Image: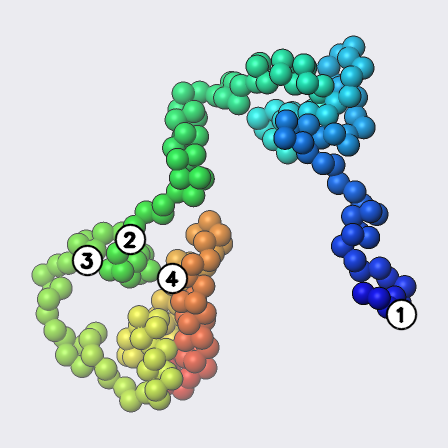
């Protein structure tokens, strides 16, 4: 820009680089602009090559001259002190770049899990296939506004349930869908928002006691 900034700031990238120059790394891996001294005891050469301090501190570095970084690297063993099982686990993680595939679960399995049922077959009994009709536990028994009908479906509830029963179903879904209960997994946040919305429609409804 030909005109200077009215506030006195020089926003050019070249100016920023001059103020805060970064170390330049050559093809050999050396940081030629480094002003450090080699950390090998007794060595006074420039420390232009860096190496991880330890397997547990890979973001912290020791600085050496060329000869001593080679010596250090020859002795370096990332898996030093690890068991065979830990070594195998690390290899398995590295194969997928540390992003393992989550266990697959069918929609049916998830639906049962929300109700606290681990095995769908454990609820099947002699009455499992009987249709109780509208007077029983199946079918619609109330005329509800569209929003409340939708809310009942989202919470996988029944319209003859009490508010306490619906609240229990709501809490069960929250436990399954909330990231804090799934190791930080946020893949079901949209469904969680729907569940919260559904409970907001029903918690003060006069159609449920």
Q: Earlier in the sequence, mark 1 or mark 2?
A: 1
Colour setup of the view? rainbow
Please say whether residue 30 is visible from this viewpoint.
Answer: yes
Rounded to the nearest angstrom, the CA distance separating label 2 from label 3 is: 19 Å
Q: Residue furthest top?
A: 42
Read off the residue under disc 1: 6
Q: Residue 83: image x %, image y %?
A: 44, 20
Rounded to the nearest angstrom, the CA distance separating label 1 from label 2 is: 61 Å
Rounded to the nearest angstrom, the CA distance separating label 4 from label 1 is: 60 Å
- In screen coordinates, is 20 left or right of 169? right
Please say whether residue 171 is visible from this viewpoint.
Answer: no
User: Mark 1 or 2, which is nearer the eye?
Assistant: 1
Q: How many marks?
A: 4
- In screen coordinates, is 152 left or right of 67? left
Read off the residue under disc 3: 123
Residue at image location 29% in from the left, 89% down from the top: 143
Q: Is residue 106 above or below residue 130?
A: above
Q: Secondary structure at mark 3?
A: helix
Residues tagged 1 and 3 counted as in contact (Cβ below 8 A): no
Read off the residue under disc 2: 105
Find residue 172 and name its label: 4
Q: Is residue 207 above or below residue 98?
A: below
Rounded to the nearest angstrom, the CA distance separating label 1 from label 3 is: 75 Å
Question: Which quarter of the rendered picture does the C terminus lie within?
Answer: bottom left
Q: Residue 34: image x %, image y %?
A: 77, 30
Asked which quadrant contains residue 160, the reply is bottom left
Q: Earlier in the sequence, mark 2 or mark 3?
A: 2
The residue carrying pointer 2 sits among few (fewer than 14), some (14 to 19) or many (20 or more) residues within 10 Å by Cα, namely: few
User: Mark 4 or 1, which is nearer the eye?
Assistant: 1
Q: Earlier in the sequence, mark 2 or mark 4?
A: 2
Question: Which quarter of the rendered picture does the N terminus lie within?
Answer: bottom right
């Amino acid at each position: 820009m030909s005109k200077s900034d009215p506030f006195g700031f020089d926003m050019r990238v070249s100016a920023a680089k001059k103020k805060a120059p970064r170390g330049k790394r050559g093809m050999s891996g050396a940081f030629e602009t480094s002003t450090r001294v080699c950390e090998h005891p007794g060595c006074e050469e420039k420390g232009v090559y860096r190496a991880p301090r330890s397997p547990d501190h890979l973001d912290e570095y020791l600085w050496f001259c060329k000869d001593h970084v080679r010596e250090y690297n020859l002795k370096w063993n990332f898996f030093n002190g690890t068991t065979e099982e830990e070594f195998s686990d690390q290899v398995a993680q590295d194969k997928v770049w540390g992003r393992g595939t989550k266990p697959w679960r069918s929609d049916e399995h998830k639906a049962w899990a929300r109700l606290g049922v681990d095995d769908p077959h454990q609820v099947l009994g002699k009455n499992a296939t009987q249709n109780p009709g509208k007077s029983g536990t199946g079918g619609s028994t109330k005329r509800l506004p569209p929003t409340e009908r939708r809310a009942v479906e989202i919470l996988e509830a029944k319209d003859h349930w009490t508010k306490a029963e619906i609240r229990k179903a709501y809490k069960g879904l929250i436990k399954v869908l909330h990231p804090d209960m799934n190791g930080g997994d946020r893949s079901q946040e949209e469904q969680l928002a729907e569940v919260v919305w559904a409970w907001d429609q029903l918690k003060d409804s006069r159609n449920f006691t």
